[in-house]
Amino acid sequence: MTYALQSTFSRGEIDPELVDRPDLELYRGGLYECVNYVTLKRGGFRRRGGTRFNGAVKDHSAGARLVPFEFGDDQSYMLELGEGYFRVHTSMGRVGSVEVATPYPLSAAFELKFTQSTDTLFIAGGGCRQHALKRYGETSWALEPMQFLDGPYLPVNISATNFTPAGTGNPVPKMTSNSEPSGLVTSSNNSGSAWQVFAQGEGTVVLSSNASGWVAYEFPEAVVVDAYMLQAPSDNAEKDDMPAAWSVEASNDGAAWTILDVRDAQSTWASSEWRRFSFANETSYKHYRFKFSQGGGATSDNSSIGQLVMHQGAADQAPFEFSASSIAGINEGEGFGTEDIGRHIRLRGSDGVWRWVEIDSVVSASSVMVRLFGQALLDRSAISLWRLGSWSDRTGWPSAVGWHKNRLAFSGTDAEPTQVWESQSDDFKNFAVSQPLVASDAVSVGILSGQVNRIKWLDDDNDLLVGTSRAVRQIGKATEQDPFGPENVDQTPATNFGTCGIQPIKVGSVLLYFGRYATDMRELVYDLGSNGRVSQSVSQVQSHLFRPGIKGACYQQYPSSIIWCWDVNGRSIGFTYEREQEVYGMHRHEFGGVVECMASLSGSGFDEVWMVIRRQINGQTRRYIEIMQAPFIDQDVVDAWHLDCAVLYEGNQANRVSGLEHLEGESVILYANGSDYLTSVKDGEVSLPNGRTASKILIGFDVKARAKTLSPPVGSQDGSSLGRKISIDVTHVSVFQTGTLRMGSDGTYIDEQIKYEAGDTYGQPAPLKTGRIDANIEIRWEDGGQIVFEASGGKPCTVLALNANVSMEP
């Protein structure tokens, strides 16, 4: 006879292929079976919390996905994403009647990727343009398609096709006098030649006899101007009369002026040199004035400029035709179609400067109507250098989104499945690059691979981690001392273990992701010895739990650091994970229905796990939104919550509870005053038996928790226990705040171990037990020495350790 001590269960349920491997260290912390118990970081296992009914999804026949939205510490919402809609929930239920229409079918819901910044949730995937869900107030939400600036783009066209623009984006006509052909030009020196500033040709126009002055243009009708180009006088190299400081001002009456742009230190102009400037403006004005100082060169006289070219805001422009000489190079020779509406085209004007247009409508396969952004074109000459936009209904839209170094990153379209695009730094909608490049410009990187494997997800971990089905790669700096940007970017392999489309989970410095076929979980972590990231499986010991294929996962950081997964069959798996303490405990969970989605959200004192569960209620299919409740720790026994799909009555002493239509016709447990009462729901009501009353009554489905130990890893006289018959007659079990615990063997009987003792208050439930229980249980020789722990009803149960009195055949 000997004693077999098991002081930790932190490995949870292990694979059936390992149940006869007592030589492994993990065996001593494992279980043969662990259902509806959670393994704890400190070694024990505890009944999971039950679930609280929080409402039904909009359509019981279709289902929904849950998406967390956390605006702040006290402003957390769960979004219900269904067929063409979002609804908003809190832990108190649905938020008013908020319902936002979306372009997403339910079939695409689990393909969507999300990332958030304060009150805006960015959405990519589902075959749709990227959208932003914005919260304006508790009951004010809006989903808007994202509008991007200047890109990104496909490679530069190499065909012979060129484009001819019918407009330039310049709202000022080519002037021939101060009032012809339209508008009015005035200047501080009342020059009759001031119109030459807008004559669209090189020259020298004197606007003042001293260092300061102005020139203005009055439009017949108010227009929006948001950029301008200045050209120095053609003789500036000799005279240096170009002003070095100025402001651009606007007015609707010519008297009250609004400053739109201010510049200074603009010196050392070459003759006929162009400089370009832009500013934010969405207001239309009739009068625009260029008011300057520090002109006239060293003698501060005869201040002059060459040309001033304004750009009319694109939204204020009338679209103009943009005609191609052929359809070669346009959509692989197919030409334009309606799928190109909204697409960008980047083009280089006759001055060598890149601009971009957005397609407003399609005229023909070789002609589109466009609006011009950036700066105006100097002329209507043919354009031979151009690039079509990467994103459109024709080429596809990005399927993944994430953050990286204060940039919004997207990846993976139909046309470019391995491409990553990062916005300008701190300008999330701008994908422009400058001339010359600067570090804050947008970044575009094609993932290097021998195969075309579409990018599955993006994750920010100092470097941008990029998951594909064959590998995980990382995008970061090429040289550490310089800032990240288009001229300092590099990509390297992180691991050749690929991934599926499930978004990975970050736990501390470790990234947990699912393998290519979603049948294993891996951790990606930096290894100092390897000077890089390494990937290893964390599910190999429990591979049987992942075999059907995982459909999704979420992370509950508090209180126990658990990754919750659900598989393609709607079964749930919990994974207690604390890498530094070598805690890798997995456990199965049954909720009495099919789990279709799980998501975590910050709650009050703990992270909530929300679920969509498909149940059969009174013979009908129902889909409910339920929230897993906190584990029982340091509470009164009457406050325990271990029933599923439950609701709590709390108030005056009552015998009957109504409002239970979601449980109609079902057998339920009434947990009141620390005792369980089995009954059925009829007409949405239940009653305590025999006229009993309580001020707190929890009504829900019973949850049966079950754990079964492995055969004790004790040695026999020849050093091996495999195949030897084992018997156990006494077991010492350490428990914590436990109100129910049944122990025994599958082959004999399983008895309740928490019982009344002398001195306990009559009429009250047995007090919670903390400490050691000496359990006299019968484990037959043929039962393999395996002990079963069960708990059900409303009371808590936590097992910390056991020590079994074991007898083994010689």
Image: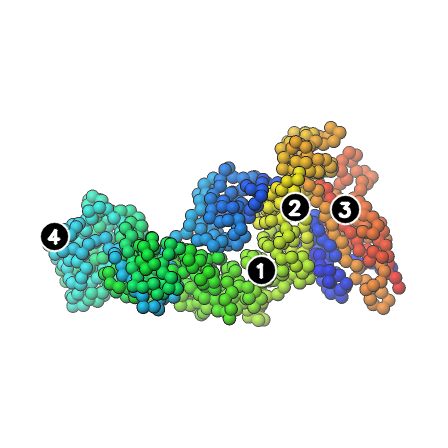
Real-space Cα distance between discs 2 and 1? 26 Å
Q: Considering only order in the chain, which callout, 3 or 4, is on the residue closer to the N terminus?
A: 4
Residue 526 visible (yes or no): no
Q: CA distance from mark 1 to mark 4?
A: 72 Å
Which amino acid, mark 3? Leu
For label 4, the crowd category at 10 Å Cα-Cα, with few meaning under 14, some 14 to 19 and many 20 or more, is few
Residue type indicated by callout 4:
Asn
Percent x, y for residue 207? 15, 56
Rounded to the nearest angstrom, the CA distance separating label 4 from label 3 is 99 Å
Q: Nearer the viewer, mark 1 or mark 4?
A: 1
Q: What's under tag 2, amino acid-wise?
A: Gly
Q: Residue at x 44, y 70 (%)?
A: 479
User: Which amino acid is tagged 1?
Assistant: Tyr
The mark closer to the camera, 2 or 4, is 2
Q: Which residue is mark 3?
A: 741
Of 732 and 538, the residue lying toward us: 538
* Residue 393 against residue 453 in the figure, above or below: above
Looking at the rendering, in which quadrant would you find the N terminus?
bottom right
Pointer 4 residue = 190
Mark 2 vs 4: CB contact within 8 A: no
Q: Residue beneath label 2, please? A: 593
Q: Which residue is mark 1?
A: 513
Label 3 element class: loop
* SS state under label 2: loop
Where is residue 197 shown, x and y percent of the image?
17, 57
The residue mark sitting in front, 2 or 1, is 2
Asked whether disc 4 touches disc 3, contact meaning CB atoms under 8 Å apart, the reply is: no
The numbered mark, 3 or 1, whose residue comes first in the sequence reads: 1
